[in-house]
Amino acid sequence: METSLQLRSLVKSSGELELSLAKVPLPEPAADEVLVEIQAAPINPSDLGLLLGPADVSQVKVAGAGADMVVTAPVPQQFMRALTARLDESMPVGNEGAGKVVAAGSSPEAQALLGKLVALIGGATYAQHRIAKAADVVPLPEGATAADGASCFVNPLTALGMTETMRREGHTALVHTAAASNLGQMLNKICIADGIGLVNIVRSAEQAKILKDIGAKHIVDSTSPTFMDELTDAIAETGATIAFDAIGGGKLASQILSAMEVAINRNAAVYSRYGSSVHKQVYIYGGLDLRPTELARSYGLAWGVCGWLLTPFLMKIGPDAAKLRARVSAELKTTFASHYTAEISLAEVLKPEVIAAYTRKATGEKYLIVPTKDA
Amino acid sequence: METSLQLRSLVKSSGELELSLAKVPLPEPAADEVLVEIQAAPINPSDLGLLLGPADVSQVKVAGAGADMVVTAPVPQQFMRALTARLDESMPVGNEGAGKVVAAGSSPEAQALLGKLVALIGGATYAQHRIAKAADVVPLPEGATAADGASCFVNPLTALGMTETMRREGHTALVHTAAASNLGQMLNKICIADGIGLVNIVRSAEQAKILKDIGAKHIVDSTSPTFMDELTDAIAETGATIAFDAIGGGKLASQILSAMEVAINRNAAVYSRYGSSVHKQVYIYGGLDLRPTELARSYGLAWGVCGWLLTPFLMKIGPDAAKLRARVSAELKTTFASHYTAEISLAEVLKPEVIAAYTRKATGEKYLIVPTKDA
């Protein structure tokens, strides 16, 4: 039987993470399924949780080579409880990707996709092949390569999900942190096109420049000594009352709420003992800073800090999700273009020096796995 | 012109809080208004913010005596910015109260209230008299005294607001902190009557006993060395996925979310890399602990921590608020009975030893201002 390589992540109850390439049987598609040869799959920040978990990657050990390489790293004891549900289960990895349909089931829908380039989401994309329902893959538009389409779900739909959430919850402008990321750049393009006020919070002059160069209007640097004043001014100017925060830990979410409250109260006619009645919202969608979130609660009681995740959001908006997907497809090579630092093979994902590179989460750096590439 | 005493709180830009009894002209009610002689007004925790703000009450200074007494206390510099909107403005205090209608405007609605005992909410109840719209006061049921009706808004409607919020947001059981408070006792009575699972978090054996004596089923003590296990068990047993937290500061809100997540995952069939998809919610409605709220975010992304305030909630539910009010009226001397530690005069509110008593916020202690009482 023919086999195919699939990247696996395993956390053992002994306290060790193990990455390996499993040889899995190449499956036959059922009537309504297609078999996709994956040609490109991005390493998004949201993939790292399942791929590496809280393992200490500074202590990786390597055994074997090429497709037989096995990499291990210790998982600090305090994180083991949170991993109970995945212990000793070898898990495929990779949220999204794109590739060519090389086999198709008997249904007309599946047959119509044979030979086409498609994008897909839903896990197990760090592999040479993946089975998918014909209805779940998205044919790429004319002229788009697998690399163009590999990242067409997570970042584009998250960026559109932010402006869509903003509108649905009655806000008119927004704040974004770690704003020079690939995602943040897309968000700027969307907000410029749609005329939405966007306050970009960055952590360095280099990041500020990236955004300035693509036309961002409000950029504040959290390392500036006058950060809070600048943030408050930008929020007052845009009227932003909702923020999306990729940082998570520390005081930033709380600082954003404080700045919103001060901006709102600048024009308040009367004192309200419970703070302004305008609802101020921060959605935490990432965890670049793993420390606890610290909320000073110095902004009355009309505020919320909540987790935000793409899939439940798309389920909640139901049929409207199709509109967001159509926009991504139409603007795949413009608004939603991704840029990759390097293309790596499946085996390279396991190499210690490559692990060090893609876990650095440097701004603007993004790695693309090309499973068709030799190790 | 006749005058009436009204308690005032003033924060001066010099950094000093001043409490005094102002002599204000006794107003004539307009056609649709009534003049209420306030006979009872409670000091709720939610009144202390406007009354004393962040002033250091261990350093109060007294000048004068009786109705001419003026009390001052320093406001630490770091809190002054948050008080900008109320600086140098003498503010009346007191959220709710009850008393007798001693004058009424010409409208039939106002005239019908003349001589009746009524309850009212909306500020300035720490006073001998208060003008109110006839439509805004609630006649007390037969046999109820002003003391019975003085606290019929804030605590009863907050407790009912909690179970109402629970139902509206799709939860079936709840967690409450500082659970042996007057409010917490009401909440237990409501939940027992309505068959709602309630996890009570207390901070001492004495508090646990108060709740046990009124029939509470799930009581966990946060000072217990096995607190997290007990909390998780109680949450698993009740299925609680929403909490109302009066503490605010520290790790408690985060611990509740953690316990909910562990309880939900006990029966989870598959590992979800982003945590359970069940939304876990904590509403912070008080600030007994003024330190920052620390969120560990070890419970996936389906969670929210938000401020909760009664008035906007009542506005949101619109006409349904009348149903809650009707229940309070019907159960005023049972479910919603308040017990007071002491009755104090308006002048006594300003006495240093009395300030020390009502700012202690000891469990079960509650003070009732009786403006008709002599100093």
Image (tube, coloured by chain):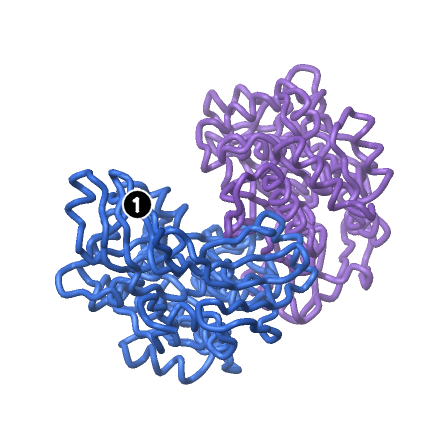
Chain colours: A purple, B blue
In the displayed structure, does residue A14 sit left or right of residue A358? left
Residue position marked by numbered label 1 in the rendering? B28
- Chain ID for label 1? B
Q: Nearer the viewer, residue B251 or A183?
A: B251
Q: Residue at x 23, y 58 (%)?
A: B100
Q: Quadrant of residue A117?
A: top right
Callout 1 crowding tier (Cα within 10 Å): few <14, some 14–19, many ≥20: few
Q: Tell me residue A114's x, y (percent).
A: 58, 22
Q: Tell me residue A157's x, y (percent).
A: 60, 32
**Is residue A234 depicted above or below B90 in this figure?**
above
Quadrant of the rendering where the N terminus of chain A is positioned: top right
In the displayed structure, does residue B109 sit left or right of residue B185? left
Is disc 1 placed on a helix, strand or loop? loop
At label 1, the amino acid type is Glu
Q: Nearer the viewer, residue A159 or B311?
A: B311
Q: Nearer the viewer, residue B96 or B287?
A: B96
Q: Tell me residue B35's x, y (percent).
A: 28, 50
Could one spot residue A115 in this view of the protein? no
Farthest residue toward the left? B142
Q: Quadrant of residue B241?
A: bottom left
Quadrant of the rendering where the C terminus of chain A is positioned: top right
In the displayed structure, does residue A75 sit left or right of residue B157? right
Q: Residue at x 78, y 59 (%)?
A: A57
**Is residue A39 depicted above or below B312 in this figure?**
above
Q: Residue at x 50, y 29 (%)?
A: A321
Could one spot residue A221 in this view of the protein? yes
**Is residue A118 depicted above or below B359 in this figure?**
above
Q: Tell me residue A343's x, y (percent).
A: 81, 36
Farthest residue toward the top? A142
Q: Nearer the viewer, residue B349 or B329?
A: B349
In the displayed structure, does residue A73 sit left or right of residue B231? right
Farthest residue toward the front? B1
